[in-house]
Image: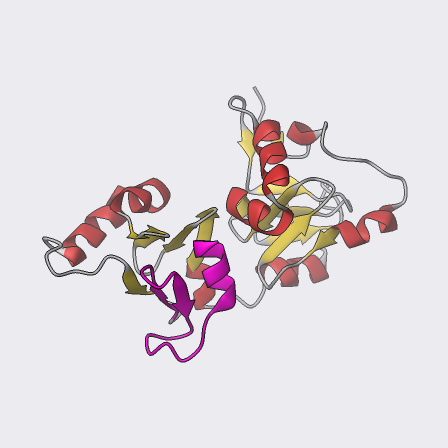
Amino acid sequence: MKPRDVRNGMLGLMLLSTLGGAHAADVFYPQQGEVCDRVSHFCADRQGISMGLTELHLGKSAQDKLQQALGEGGEVHLDSYTLSNGVYCESQTHTCYSDRFKTRKDTSATEKLFGQQTANSAVFFPSSGVICDRKSFLCADASGISLGLTQSYLGQAAQNRLQQALGSGVGVDMGAYTLSNGVYCDSHAKACYTDRFKTQLDFQTTKRLFH
């Protein structure tokens, strides 16, 4: 079976229109490196379509619709998708195009979604209430660092490195950690801060991880 574009797997969810401009307001960028589509009921980051971001920015109903559309079978490309305004994005090439036939590069969408990569690109939210850091080789939820989540989202090698770093675990506070972008999260306080000195609350990270 030929792998199908996410758009093909979501025909029941997308509302096609001859007026491309009518969809402009439905596609928005919550912040650098993220795109959401109200019509197609999904959000994506540099890695591709994200269930966690979909729930965060569009709500549980949108996440449920996305889950239903993706289904349990068939090959669906989460890293390539067509937005309701016709723009087609590929995470593998870090490029968005004016249409799925790649007629021309959409410079604006490409810059908003894939441009200005910083340390933040190593930190991502694979699902609601879960944060992962590729550089620090860890994943955590609201309770703190999780070996299980690290294996699930970053692989066995990352889990092994985390296990080695934690050692026996005696005296290690799994509920407090600093990410590679400098953000410090404290599961006991249910909050993340801009640095380990708790200078300022990091509202976005706190909201994604603990709410």
Where is residue 107 drawn, in percent x and y? 70, 61
Tell whether position 37 is magenta: no
Instruction: Choose between 87 and 167: the one closer to the eye.
Output: 167
Q: Residue at x 56, y 35 (%)?
A: 77
Q: Is residue 49 above or below residue 7?
A: below
**Colour setup of the view:** secondary structure
Where is residue 160 drawn, in percent x and y? 20, 48
Q: In the drawing, does residue 109 fall left or right of residue 192?
A: right
Where is residue 54 drawn, in percent x and y? 58, 46
The furthest residue to the front? 189
Q: How many discs mark residues in the rendered view?
A: 0
Q: Residue at x 90, y 40 (%)?
A: 18
Q: Residue at x 55, y 49 (%)?
A: 53
Where is residue 104 drawn, in percent x and y? 74, 52
Q: Is residue 17 above or below residue 53?
A: above
Quadrant occupied by the N terminus: top right
Tell whether position 201 is magenta: yes
Instruction: Choose between 207 and 125: the one closer to the eye.
Output: 207
Q: In the drawing, does residue 130 fall left or right of residue 51?
A: left
To which quarter of the image does residue 123 belong? Answer: bottom left
Instruction: Choose between 119 and 96: the one closer to the eye.
Output: 119
Task: Report the span colored magenta.
Answer: 183-211
